[in-house]
């Protein structure tokens, strides 16, 4: 079982739609949680950190449920430019600090 | 914001050759850099943690003699893929943390390696 699991998609939605992505993680020792965005053959870019209290950044809302080991991302009023792969990422400490990436959920926003 | 420069962005080479990839932190000192590999439609997999002035820490299953990492200064880490084979074809990407930026990592733009 992967340490961070995501539905690969693709999610194909029209402009203006609301779309939600889910992610689960298996290591209860995970410390911090993030959503990254990655465009094809480009580096991942931090979209937002995720907190138990939930946090919002414009059209994006992220939520963490530590008890269920579940992370979500909600995108409202989808734009064409939102088309990308969204990576669920957790951090933990082994011998050093590490980021563990999910394989990503692909989003396609159509006109 | 902090910038990490990775070079080259794309390499095509013959099987058996060695390829060096550079990762530079341009406006900050990075005592630790991370090297990832990403195969198509898969997640970024951490290969190794590069520590300035000491040996790199490799993840399980990553051959340290094949993927040589050198972190000789606070702004430069290099990854050398020795005797590359077609199965080494992948997207390689580095990242670095900056003191004071918390857990945020800054990523290089990646290197697409194609071994013929």
Image: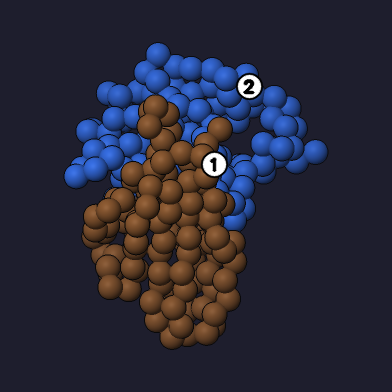
Chain colours: A blue, B brown
- Across and down, in percent, residue B2 comes to 52, 36
- Across and down, in percent, residue A14 comes to 73, 35
Q: Can residue B5 be seen in this view?
A: yes
- Across and down, in percent, residue A78 comes to 69, 30
Q: Which label sits in the foreground, 2 or 1?
A: 1
Of residues B5 and A60, the one drawn nearer to the viewer in this rendering: B5
- Label 1 chain ID: B
Q: Say which mark, if any, is on residue A86.
A: none
In the picture shown, does residue B7 fall above or below A84? below
Mark 2 Cα-neighbour bin, 10 Å: few <14, some 14–19, many ≥20:
few
- Label 2 chain ID: A
For residue B30, side relative to residue A7 (left or right) = left
Q: Which residue lies furthest to the top in this view?
A: A53
- Quarter of the image for the N terminus of chain B: give it: top right
Q: Do the residues labelled 2 and 1 touch (CB within 8 Å)?
A: no
In the picture shown, does residue B20 fall above or below A83? below
Q: Say which mark, if any, is on residue B3.
A: 1
Q: Which residue, given by chain and number where applicable, does mark 2 sit on?
A: A59
Q: Which residue lies furthest to the left in this view?
A: A95
- Quarter of the image for the C terminus of chain B: give it: bottom right
Of residues B17 and A89, the one drawn nearer to the viewer in this rendering: B17
Whether labels 2 and 1 belong to a single chain: the reply is: no
Q: Which residue is drawn at 43% across and 48% down?
A: B75
- Across and down, in percent, residue B69 comes to 34, 63
Of residues B46 and A4, the one drawn nearer to the viewer in this rendering: B46
Q: Which residue is drawn at 74% across and 37% down?
A: A80
């Amino acid at each position: 079982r992967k340490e961070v699991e995501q539905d690969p998609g693709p999610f194909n939605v029209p402009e203006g739609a609301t779309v939600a992505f889910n992610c689960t993680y298996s290591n209860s020792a995970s410390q911090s949680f993030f959503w990254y965005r990655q465009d094809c053959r480009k580096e991942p870019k931090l979209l937002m950190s995720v907190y138990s209290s939930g946090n919002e950044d414009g059209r994006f809302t992220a939520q963490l449920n530590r008890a269920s080991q579940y992370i979500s991302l909600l995108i409202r009023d989808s734009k064409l430019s939102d088309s990308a792969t969204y990576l669920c990422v957790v951090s933990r400490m082994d011998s050093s600090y590490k980021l563990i990436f999910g394989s990503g959920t692909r989003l396609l926003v159509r006109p | 914001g902090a910038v990490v420069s990775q070079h080259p962005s794309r390499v095509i080479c013959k099987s058996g050759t060695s390829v060096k990839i550079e990762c530079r932190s341009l406006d900050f000192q990075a005592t630790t850099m991370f090297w990832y590999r990403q195969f198509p439609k898969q997640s970024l997999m951490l290969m190794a943690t590069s520590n300035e002035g000491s040996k790199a820490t490799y993840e399980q299953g990553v051959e340290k003699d094949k993927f040589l990492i050198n972190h000789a200064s606070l702004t430069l880490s290099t990854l050398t893929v020795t005797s590359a084979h077609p199965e080494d074809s992948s997207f390689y990407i580095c990242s670095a943390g900056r003191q004071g930026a918390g857990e945020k990592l800054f990523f290089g733009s990646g290197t697409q390696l194609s071994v013929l």
